Amino acid sequence: MPPPKPAVPVVVKKLPGELDWEKPVAFNINSVINEPVIQNGRIYVTENNRLVILSTSGRILSSITAGGDNSTLTKPEVSGNLTFAGSDTGDIYSFNEYGKIAWTTNIGTFKYGAYPVAAYGMLAVPVFDKGVILLSTNGKQIGLIDIKQNQIFSAPIIINSGKDVIYALESGDVVDYNLSSNSAKWTVNVKERVLYPLVGEDGVVVVLLRNSGSVIGINTQTGATLWTAQYGDIAKTQFNPVYSHGKVILANYDSSSSVSYIYIIDSQSGKLLTKTSIAEKIGIPDVADNSVYISSESGKVYSYNIDKKQMDWIYKAAGPNSISLVIGDENGVYALSPKSMIKVVR
């Protein structure tokens, strides 16, 4: 008799919202206050004075401290093989693809929502009392946008293939500065100082105002106001606005009611596409394709579908640990708890 054929293993396809894998991490990441970045299979996170680079397969590729124990790094910016971050000590750090410091320079103080922005082969660095300093990616200063005794508290945005830098001032002025003519193309006053980073792209820049919860869309070609909206639930939020594919995501946690709010707005029209609330404290939202991913203090990961206006799924991590961050790409949703990294099926 012929030998029996070996059994064919049954492959059970995991469903969206199910755990793909969980792997331990060698250290705790508890207090992520800046948006992480995911690019080319790597996740970049800053926590206090440390930059952590993880692979989307769950490995720690690098962990490096920059500055003293009491310093704090800004949101990481990734451009090519380099990662950039500012520090509240006034330093700018450039890290190579291996997580080592490539160069550093002291340039001035950052305040509130200000951090270096990288695009089109340069850095736009909003220095509190100097203006927007322009650096090449090797750290050489290539320009300065003087703010003339004003102050800057928010991150700018670079548009138009690197020809324009839009920034906002303590006076409430939002300015489009053309680098070719070295002059302001337009100036709009939004009647309140701007503390959150500007978001948008060619065609529209979106401004979120802290005290009022007002949101303003401005045409980047003309400076004309396209739309305005106001959301009281978003006033004084601790979360920066998130921009993705023409959508602006706003979030806030109301400690008095223990409820978090998420608003998704069309950046061109200002139309409120959808909103939802979650009865617990959340972390920084992330957007991938048409879903918003949200971490929570109770250890849940939420996947909210913008088109369906409902939750696609909710994943609950084992144990009482909170989820300190969540970020997604086309291959999955990745989350960090204090002791492990998990991947959830999209």
Image (cartoon, grey):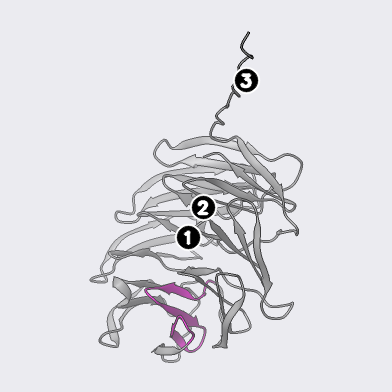
What's the CA distance linking mark 2 and mark 3?
A: 45 Å
Mark 1 residue type: Pro
User: Residue 279 appears at what percent x and percent y?
Assistant: 62, 42
Residue 101: give x, y in percent of width and height: 60, 78
Q: Which quadrant would the N terminus be assigned to in this image?
A: top right
Q: Residue at x 67, y 72 (%)?
A: 64
Q: Type of residue at label 3?
A: Pro
Residue at left offset 63%, top offset 14%: 4
Element class at badge 1: loop
- Foreground disc of the pair 2, 3: 3
Residue 238 shows in this picture: no
Q: Which mark is residue 119?
A: none
| Residue 6 marker | 3
Q: Position of residue 61 (x, y in %)?
A: 64, 62
Residue drawn 69% across and 61% down?
A: 31
- Kindly state the secondary structure of the residue where label 3 is placed: loop
Q: For mark 1, does the 10 Å Cα neighbourhood hold few (<14), some (14 to 19), or many (20 or more) residues?
A: many
User: Bounds of the magenta span?
Assistant: 113-139
From the top left corner, tell me how far across and down residue 142 is, in percent.
40, 89
* Quadrant hosting residue 230: bottom left
Density class for disc 3 (Cα within 10 Å; few <14, some 14-19, many ≥20) is few
Which marked residue is nearer to the observer: mark 2 or mark 1? 2
- The residue under the point 30% across, 56% down is 268
Query: Which residue appears farthest toward the front when viewing the image?
Result: 1
